[in-house]
Image (cartoon, grey):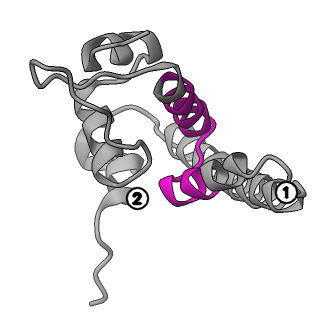
Amino acid sequence: MALTIGELGKATDTKVETIRYYERIGLLPKPPRTGGNYRAYGAAELGRLSFIRRARDLGFPLDQVRALLSLSDDRGRDCATVDALARDHLSEVERKIADLTALRRELSALIESCCGGTVADCRIIEALAPHTNG
């Protein structure tokens, strides 16, 4: 099976520019070239890019994706490191959820404080404006 970069992108729902970027930073190996100098991808690249896409969809940053790829290449290794990476990422996701929940509460309170009227009397504008001491 030989796929062009466009076909690989379509199969994994990844933009061509993103595939080239992953090659530049070493997440994907540079593929062999055809006689016409086109990139030729196979099942291994398709699987690796699918792995990268799934990890990115789960919100793993690129450095953790790189670590997960390295770990997945060593199939006989204990998975404790993988588990630790996933737990660290889950903690970060939970922190972000807490931050977003607090943000939602704050925005809801601002919206609730609005009594209509003119912009000059708007509580939301007042809350967003810089406070001056003087």
- Which element carries disc 1, helix, strand or loop? loop
Q: Closer to the camera, 99 or 51?
A: 51
Residue 70 x/y as whole percent: 63, 55
Q: Is residue 52 magenta?
A: yes
Can residue 53 be seen here? The reply is yes
Location of residue 11 with respect to 122 vertically, above or below: above
Left or right placement of residue 15 versus residue 87 in this view: left
Q: Main secondary structure of the magenta part?
A: helix
What residue would you read off at disc 2? 127
**Amino acid at dot 1:** Arg
Residue 99 in view in this figure? no
Residue segment shown in magenta: 46-67
Tell me what residue is drawn at x 9 percent, y 18 percent: 36
At label 2, counting other C-alpha atoms closer than 10 Å, the crowd grade (few under 14, some 14-19, many 20 or more) is: few
Residue 2: assigned label: none
Residue 112 shown left or right of residue 27 in the figure: right
* Numbered tag placed on residue 77 in the rendering: 1
Outermost residue toward the bottom? Answer: 134
Residue positioned 79% across, 46% down in the render: 75
